[in-house]
Image (cartoon, coloured by chain):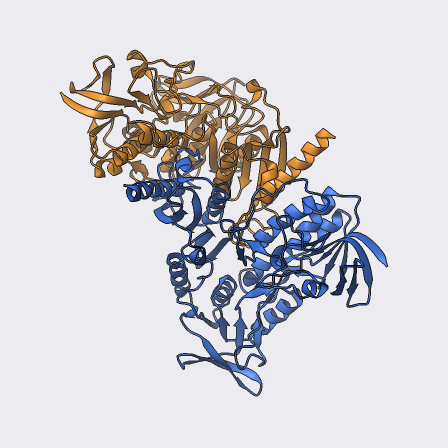
Chain colours: A blue, B orange
Amino acid sequence: MKKYDVIIIGAGPAGIITGVTAKKENPDKNILMVREEEKGLVPCGIPYIFHSLNSVDKNVMGPKPFIDLGGDVITDLIVNVDIENKTVKAKSGDKFSFEKLVFATGSRYVEATFIPGYELKNVFYIKKSYNYITNLFNELKDKKNIVVVGGGFIGAEVAEQLALHADKKVSLIESEEYCFSKAFSNELSEIATESLNKTKVNVQTSTLVEKVLGENGVVSGVQLNNKNIISADAIIFAVGYKPNSELAATAGLKTNKVNAIIVDNYGRTSENNIFAVGDCSQTLGFLTGRCDNIMLASTATAEARVLGYNLFGVKIKNSFTGTIGIFSTEINGLSMAAAGLNEKNTLSSNIDFITATFSDFDKHPGTLEGTLPLTTKLYVSPSDGSILGGEIWGGKSSGEIINIIGFAIQKGLTVYELISLQIGTHPLLTSAPTKPVIIKAAEVAISKIRDCKK
Amino acid sequence: MKKYDVIIIGAGPAGIITGVTAKKENPDKNILMVREEEKGLVPCGIPYIFHSLNSVDKNVMGPKPFIDLGGDVITDLIVNVDIENKTVKAKSGDKFSFEKLVFATGSRYVEATFIPGYELKNVFYIKKSYNYITNLFNELKDKKNIVVVGGGFIGAEVAEQLALHADKKVSLIESEEYCFSKAFSNELSEIATESLNKTKVNVQTSTLVEKVLGENGVVSGVQLNNKNIISADAIIFAVGYKPNSELAATAGLKTNKVNAIIVDNYGRTSENNIFAVGDCSQTLGFLTGRCDNIMLASTATAEARVLGYNLFGVKIKNSFTGTIGIFSTEINGLSMAAAGLNEKNTLSSNIDFITATFSDFDKHPGTLEGTLPLTTKLYVSPSDGSILGGEIWGGKSSGEIINIIGFAIQKGLTVYELISLQIGTHPLLTSAPTKPVIIKAAEVAISKIRDCKK
């Protein structure tokens, strides 16, 4: 039985970044990564396989950087972990022993078992699996009527992409009033849903799928709670993901109420030398310290960098305890992003805030060709003026400006500090120096706070 | 003689933002802004007048937001300031008295009086004047051979824009080895110059203009120090700007060795109740506290926000003492930006640093259409790992990523903190979550620092 210093179960973003970082820091340690399939997918790129990339193989990622550093990789499925004896057993029958073990088992799609007809042929999911998505990609080629169930990021992006094919009719069914409502505020969810409505997708919100209809065991449509029927030759459920933690739980690791593996700030589980990272592990709210359930590749890789550096003792401290979700997307050419608190995700935490909004353009002067609007909304503590959350939408620079907002949240920056923040501007690249949207929104917040204190 | 609580001399970005902020904060104060011309220009938009906007009037900005708040504006030229009696006198003969006075007189182009022939007809400058630029725009319409002298931002951008006209031959003469060498590192200056070389502009670096040649008092070309002659029917000198501080100096205000008005961290001059802001006022290096000479609209507006809030007593402290220059541009579709320290601008300050570079793409996977490379270079203190400077080039998101780097410099962020920084990523908007360029460059820096400490 081969012994490894470290075994990493999983080769998604969390597993790869843990492996790369740990191997780079500890070139003398032998590290094994176990992946389930030969090829892996860029998770957030999956929707773009269906049109923009028009290829599964253009969206692959793998542990090559880890292998280049001298890491070992096998393709197998770990079926048993023996924490006491420090061994793992694979489906192939192979056994390995470890000094340290990392669960980077990611998340699994939620199955639609609660909807009658879910077992029919041509009911699909967005599994993070090269083999599955390759099959789905091929299956969808001749499908004309497709119903996507679930208007979160994955569902909405997949629907938008599929609808770009001239020969496909695509419907999107979302139970909430707006799509994207888990990540975005009411205001931005509505804007995002409107943007989706401008595409060819038939968006039906506040609507539930009651039943998947079939003929001869094959999907023929869906019946909605409003009794309407939409004909379909394929259904794609995108109704969420859950931590893939069964193996860890069976091995005896503690999990939380959403079945995420409980870890501390350095990815350490309840057992010595056993770690968990990424979607399978617990995240705690940055402001609240309470359990939330953020599963994002960007969050996972940040955790993995911390774990990779610190696997053999804490060498670089985790500077930001707690997780803020930072979400971004683009629908029909409208970029949208959110970080931290909004009026919905804070509901149960009862955090006091005011909002401040400012709109301008993503270039300047606004008369330049290709200029798009840019609007930011900040969520600010009325007591100390610290930035608790923010959203931005409009031009593509939203995708990086949200990282400035995210940075501000993590560093506890106040709107008062933003007044003197120095930035760079350029006509072709940013808002005008007279109206940088974040700073102008900070000014709005300062006025609001002063008015409520009067 | 009308008395004002505040008189602001100048209606560029610094003047307007001081006025808007001060009036918003102090609605009961009467504030006068004095502008030289009826219409003002967006300073950094001027190069784009010559092609992308193809219009002067698409690049105007004015004090409307200030007027909307109840501010007074006159078009006149202040010719005398009497600090003792607190009065100003305009060219029209009008006199006004003030409680507080703000110099926002900006900067003036450097005249080419050191080059024989500078007085010939069709020698032009990039003056920040609506009337002058309108005339230049019209004059250049029928000019076929144009020589731009000076390869800083303004000169290079103007040359790039003019060369987009099929009927124009444009040459750019730069004395240094590369264009943009005042703002960019050697590496990025070279890349920027290469990008300019890919346009139709005939770029000649390490070259001096010895003489402007003329016939009958009209420009006919330039003679270079290599004895070559370039024929030209127009010459545009873009050889720098200097603080427009003569009025202030005559009034008795102290100026520094580059003739910028000396101010403290709140824009206060050597005289009570007299302020200066923007290009006409002194900037001190963020790291060194020594006088530098940063004249950027983005810097000016940050100073103006601080001044506007604090004109009647410091209400919001200036959180970032000292100035970091943040520069960005786009040449031939390549975006480039720099913030803070590089190996050239730190030369006289003798600051210890290491550099760390990382390249990836501005979208992910890199197979997505329209994906551009993205490279960042960080300048990092080898002792504490704090980020001292940075550059980024490639896709358009460089224009906002440089603001993340600028933010990091101002907040004293270290490369160790960057490891755990949480960011948001999206295929269409950012690098991959596994390879955010700033964080990966931080990893490179950490390895380098560890290696030099071994």
Instruction: Identify the image quadrant of the N terminus of chain A.
Output: bottom right
Question: From the viewer's perspective, is residue B390 above or below residue A36?
Answer: above
Instruction: Identify the image quadrant of the C terminus of chain A.
Output: top left
How many marks on residues? 0
Q: Picture quarter containing residue A122?
A: bottom right
Q: Position of residue B295 (x, y in %)?
A: 41, 26
Query: Which residue is pictured at 67% across the width and 66% down the height?
Result: A246
Question: From the viewer's perspective, is residue B257 above or below residue A412?
Answer: above
Q: Picture quarter containing residue B300?
A: top left
Q: B447 or A233: which is nearer to us?
A: B447
Q: Position of residue B223 (x, y in %)?
A: 47, 19
Q: A283 or A256: which is nearer to us?
A: A256
Q: Position of residue A413 (x, y in %)?
A: 46, 39
Question: From the viewer's perspective, is residue B394 above or below residue B105?
Answer: below
Q: Position of residue A170 (x, y in %)?
A: 47, 71
Q: B364 or A357: which is nearer to us?
A: A357
